[in-house]
Amino acid sequence: MRDCGLECTLEGSTKASRFQGWVLLLTICAAGIGGTFQFGYNLSIINAPTLYIQEFTNETWQMRTGRPLPDHLVLLVWSLIVSLYPLGGLLGALLAGPLAITLGRKKSLLVNNIFVVAAATLFGFSRRAGSFEMVMLGRLLVGVSAGVSMNVQPMYLGESAPKELRGAVAMTSAIFTALGIVMGQVVGLRELLGGPQAWPLLLASCLVPGVLQLASLPLLPESPRYLLIDRGDSKACLAALQRLRGPADLAGELAELEQERAACGGRRARRPWELFGDRALRRQVASLVVLGGAMELCGNDAVYSYASAMFVQARIPPEKVQYAVIGTGGCELLATLVSCVVIERVGRRVLLMGGYCLMTCWGSVFTAALCLQSSFPWMPYLAMSCIFAFILSFGIGPAGVTGILATELFDQTARPAAYMVCGVLMWTMLFLVGLGFPFIMEGLSHFLYVPFLCVCVCAAVYTFFFLPETKGKTFLEISEELYRLNFPGWSQSPMWRGPEVVQSTEL
């Protein structure tokens, strides 16, 4: 009889674990396919139709005026089409915080698809309407969508995951980004949608992941932390936890959430500028700014820009270069998958420091290979190998771990504002790097990577001395540790205010 009871208990525990795993996995996939996947996808698909869109711009102008557009103005229009994407991302980052607080994490991701549908419609009918302005507006809107999802998705997943899986779950945002880059490179092949007639369909294909998210995400639960701490809805929080965790014992996690709600003490959500004036958040804000800026200034985007030239110099046939470029995106995808598996074992700090140290190493070898490429016939092959190694190193640490910082280092009231600061910083840096890299390449020649190497070294040093490890800790434990680091003379955080009920928060 006792054996039968034990078997039933074990069987029930196994079913509960499987249930939790499937619901959490579906939540990750539904949030990711219309979230950071869109960011990576729309970042990479614009490369394939470059010449075709420029020709379309010239033809459209000639039909309107009877005169062809000068080459320098064609390049200006193209640069605007490219740069409107990070500009839209910046606007989306500013929208993400208010949306996440007003609508919730899940509804924000769903509403965000309005921008995707509008952009896909503009892309799809731009050629028929004879309007390159529709392409420009579509790039702006799809950038807004990427800016919102890049902030809300890791917030939603980080708040929905159990603490022992929080790092791995939050890392999936980087996995979907890398997957989007690879899929964009594949779909952009000339054999698929990269031809001269299919480019409107290529740009409009962003509608597919948006529709998939609209069909799947409504069936999955909202963030339990948002429901309890921001909305004060205990029943909805319990229902969400039961769906995410299955019929397991939730008493411990509920107690932790109640403590976190009491620690927030009924305070309203922080505004972004308030984070910089709060002494209790100085280490968190410094880490967010330093490491968030380092991720964009470490040179990974520059490596992607330089990859095609290196492949040509390594004597890869020009018609085969597009397949080699897919390999660069595959490297980042592989590295983020490995990082997702090991992050809960080795911790955040080790992955960040290891990634930046390896990037410094491979970037130095890459610089030497560029300087000596005319002296030795095998140097272009070494430079090409360094490109893959550099991207692998970036994927192991900075690509995914940096996105977790705003989730783990800030409490519920400051987290949306922290993601707004992080998003504004990321998109601004992305725009500046894209704008300034051609001048860096021209001015520094073979030593173009020296400034990026300095950034990698500084990021590794900062991580070693100032970033606390958050592996396996609750949000409340992380807040207490950071308070002690910000106020070394105090033994206990004054955040505890007793078990007050938070009815709502507002930005």
Image (cartoon, rainbow, N blue to C red):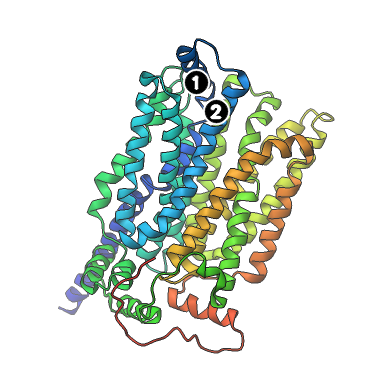
Q: Is residue 405 left or right of residue 441?
A: left
Percent x, y for residue 211? Answer: 29, 40
Percent x, y for residue 406? Answer: 49, 63
Residue at x 51% of width, y 88% of height = 492
Check the picture and name the quadrant holding the C terminus: bottom left
State the mark number for residue 372. Answer: none
Residue at x 56% of width, y 72% of height = 277
Percent x, y for residue 265? Answer: 37, 81
Q: Looking at this rendering, what residue extends furthest in the top direction?
A: 66
Check the picture and name the quadrant holding the N terminus: bottom left
Q: Is residue 196 above or below residue 163?
A: above
Which is nearer the eye, 383 or 6? 383
Q: Looking at this rendering, what residue extends furthest in the left direction?
A: 1
Residue at x 69% of width, y 23% of height = 315
Q: Is residue 333 above or below residue 169?
A: above
Circle 2 crowding by C-alpha within 10 Å: few under 14, some 14–19, many from 20: some
Dot 1 corresponds to which residue? 57
Cα distance, mark 1 to mark 2? Answer: 8 Å
Residue 361 seen: no
Which is nearer the eye, 106 or 97? 97
**Residue type marked 2:** Trp
Q: Secondary structure at mark 1?
A: helix
Q: Is residue 261 left or right of residue 42?
A: left
Dot 2 corresponds to which residue? 78
Percent x, y for residue 334? Answer: 51, 45
